[in-house]
Amino acid sequence: MKSTSSWWKYLLLVWIAVWSAVGIILPIAGNLADLAYLKQVNAPGEIRIKVDIDHSQPAEFDREEGMFVFQGTDAGGRKATFYIPSKPEGFDRATSLLVEARYDEERHGVRVCQVVDVDPGLTLPYIPGLEERARIIFFHVPMAWMTVIAFLVSMWYGIAYLRKHDLEDDMKSANAAGLGLLFCLLATITGSIWAKFNWGSFWNWDPRETSIFVLLLIYGAFFALRSAIEVEEKRARLSAVYTILAFVTVPFFIFIMPRILPGLHPGSADDTSSGPVMSAGGLNAVMRVILYSLLAGFIALFAWLMNIRNRVSRLLVRTDFEA
Amino acid sequence: MKTMRAVWAIFLKDVRSEVRTRYAVNALLMFVITTLAVIMFSLAGEVISASAQAGILWVVMFFAAMSGLSRSFVSEEERGTTFTLQLCSGPLGVYFGKLLFNIVLVILLNIVIVLLYLITMDQFVISQPGLFWLVIFLGSLGLAASTTIIAAIIAKASSKGTLFPVLSFPILLPLLMAGIDATKLAVEDNVWDAAWPNLQILGAYIVVVITASYMLFDYVWKD
Amino acid sequence: MYEFLSENSLYVVMVIVVVIWAGFFFYLFRLDRKLHKIEEQR
């Protein structure tokens, strides 16, 4: 507690800022399989795809078409012929292109409508139906996990109180729950804003939405219980018991219900299509690194806020005592 | 053996005081009748789906339990008999005695609710009676199990009446969701297999809640 | 507003990030008030 070194706090700020920026800035790029999928479901449209240029067959200008023709390979190893109105700057030295393209029925090739970037570097996968909204995973999912982690911390200190009867543990338990409530509200609000644009309404009673709602209710009930008991020891004891009781029933929601009931979130029982988003093995490596880095950042932020909150609580106890 | 005797003695004590005052029975019966009457008025012969029927049935069962079961520890606190109970028996005896009484009360209550529901609601037909009554039985056990420990918690707090449903609802929600879903399946004439995950949830819920209450009751009970 | 956001889905993500930072700001603000009260008591 005495350590006032704050280098890690600056690091934390930079860490969260950088990973958030990476999560927002990295372009989303599909591949040829996504184009084929769009053609299959009869929704031909332009999407961004990333393609490696095959320089062994030099790009030629086709007079009949009035366009350059080149061969390209995508990340999945598929090959296709690309038609592009004009060569972008640096085309001959570039290894890959990020382009807006659509499938061309007449030429059986890929028609490049616009070149977005030359040599784009890392990209995020394209998920049909989500587009840019896929980036929510970096911000909403850590909030939801933090809600559960804060709840775990709260229960941990609750158990510690029941074992050692130290009011300091009760204070930590309440403070962790307060932060958990904040994370829970943020997860709910961000989720429902996103749901409005992706699923059409703010709230759908999908099993996972129900589970975050229950967490919200539990946090609410926890604070209602605490405000109804005046004696400190009794309050500490009963609220610790309640957190433990809630924790043994909450797993039904967070870990069992969303998986056996059909729903909209990835990982539900009837989920076959959107596997790449969340199923542990399927999540793209770049996305996973960003998600876990941001989660680590938010855990550190939680620890810091919790530490500040605890210090305020200690001051509060001391001033009450002196007064 | 000694605990078993204590459980039985406390159960009998509660039954006797109930028979004498008929507080729970009278109040609960009136509560159920008024609730069902309100539902019948508002439906006015409307045809509703099986899931809505199951939902309404569980709403009545939930609120009946909420109004009846909060008394079990509050009454001891009000009459000042908590200390006597603590002297006479260990916490386990008290917990399981109260639990037993609540289970019996809730099962009887739910049977009455279902019978009244069957009589007043013509369209409510149980296609799978075995499954239906099993769900009602498991649901009653779960309701009694979680409300017993919460009643013990709120008996120590102020503003007891409002706090009881607030604390109970999140804890009971897994039970309610699984119960409503399984009831719907039993009403719609489904095979048992369809309701199996729900029955598993109900069973696991009961075991988990009773085990947790058994371990935590000591902390709630002693002052 | 709704149309703009549904056409430019990147801005939905931006709104979400702003909501999260607003949440943390709100928490810090309340903490600040609490500290202020303690300081006044002394």
Image (cartoon, rainbow, N blue to C red):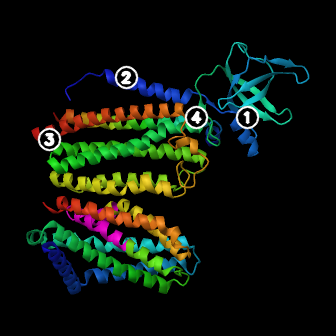
Magenta-colored stretch includes residue B146: yes
Question: Between marks 3 and 1, how big is the CA–CA gap?
Answer: 65 Å
In the drawing, does residue A247 fall left or right of residue A293?
left
Q: Identify the subunit bearing mark 2.
A: A
- Can the viewer see residue B66? no
User: Of residues A300 and B62, which is closer to you in this image?
Assistant: A300
Question: Looking at the picture, do discs 4 and 2 lie on one chain?
Answer: no
Location of residue B215 (image quadrant):
bottom left
Q: CA distance from mark 1 to mark 2?
A: 40 Å
Q: Which chain does the residue under circle 4 lie in?
A: C
Q: Which secondary structure class fits the magenta region best?
A: helix
Residue A46's disc number: 1
Same chain? Circles 3 and 1: yes
Task: Tell me which residue sits at (43%, 78%) in the image.
Answer: B133
Marks 3/1 in contact by CB < 8 Å: the verdict is no
- Identify the residue under disc 4: C11
Badge 1: residue crowd in 10 Å (few <14, some 14–19, many ≥20): some
Report how far apart the C-alphas of labels 4 and 3 lie in the structure. Answer: 47 Å
For marks 1 and 4, give the one nearer the viewer.
1
Nearer to us of marks 2 and 3 is: 2
At x 57%, y 47%, the residue is A196
Range drawn in magenta: B139-166
Q: Secondary structure at mark 1?
A: loop
| Chain ID at mark 1 | A
- Give the residue pinned by disc 2: A11
Type of amino acid at the residue the image marks with label 3:
Asp
